[in-house]
């Protein structure tokens, strides 16, 4: 009997790709926090640091988007193009938002 989670990841669905594309960088961002900053500052201080330090924002967003690259590659290599398209669309959205935030604010 397969685990339900694995059945979900086997689907080729644009909505699944969008969900993965949104969740993976957020989870990677939290993992990066627990790996590097957990003992030094609280989570709210970490997010404040991201808002105020543009170079750190760029570095951490790059690390976070690697998670999307991993999932995108997985879905492209298994020929689940609709899901990969959703992941790619959200990745582009994240990149544009970070660039606008970095350049304007």
Image (tube, rainbow, N blue to C red):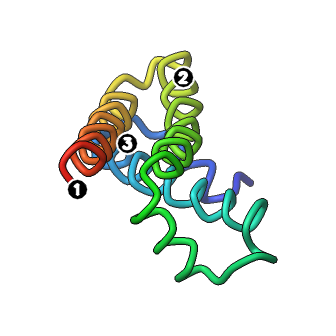
Locate residue 95, reporting x and y percent: 33, 38
Q: Which residue is mark 2?
A: 73
Query: Camera-side residue: 8 or 31?
Result: 31
Q: Secondary structure at mark 2?
A: helix
Q: In the picture provided, is 33 more to the left or to the right than 56?
A: right
Query: In the figure, 69 relative to 77: above or below?
Result: below
Residue at image x 41%, y 46%? 21
Q: Position of residue 53 (x, y in %)?
A: 46, 58
Q: Which residue is mark 1?
A: 105
Dot in front, 3 or 1:
1
The residues tagged by marks 1 and 2 sit, at their Cα atoms, a distance apart of 32 Å
Q: Quadrant of residue 13?
A: top left
Q: At numbered mark 1, what does the secondary structure look like: helix, strand or loop?
A: loop
The disc, 1 or 2, on the residue closer to the chain's N-terminal end is 2
How crowded pointer 3 is (Cα within 10 Å; few <14, some 14-19, many 20+) is rated as many
Q: Are marks 3 and 1 in contact (CB under 8 Å)?
A: no
Q: Vertical placement of 18 versus 68: above or below?
A: below
Which comes before the other along the chain, label 3 or label 1? 3
Q: Which mark is residue 42?
A: none
Mark 3 or mark 2: name the one nearer the start of the chain: 3
């Amino acid at each position: 009997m397969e685990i339900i989670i694995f059945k979900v990841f086997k689907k080729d669905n644009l909505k699944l790709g969008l969900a993965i594309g949104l969740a993976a960088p957020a989870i990677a961002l939290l993992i990066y926090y627990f790996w590097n900053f957990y003992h030094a500052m609280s989570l709210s201080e970490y997010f404040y640091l991201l808002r105020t330090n543009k170079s750190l924002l760029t570095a951490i967003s790059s690390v976070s988007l690697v998670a999307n690259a991993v999932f995108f590659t997985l879905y492209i290599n298994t020929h689940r193009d609709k899901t990969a398209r959703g992941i790619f669309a959200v990745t582009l959205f994240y990149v544009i938002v970070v660039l606008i935030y970095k350049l304007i604010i």
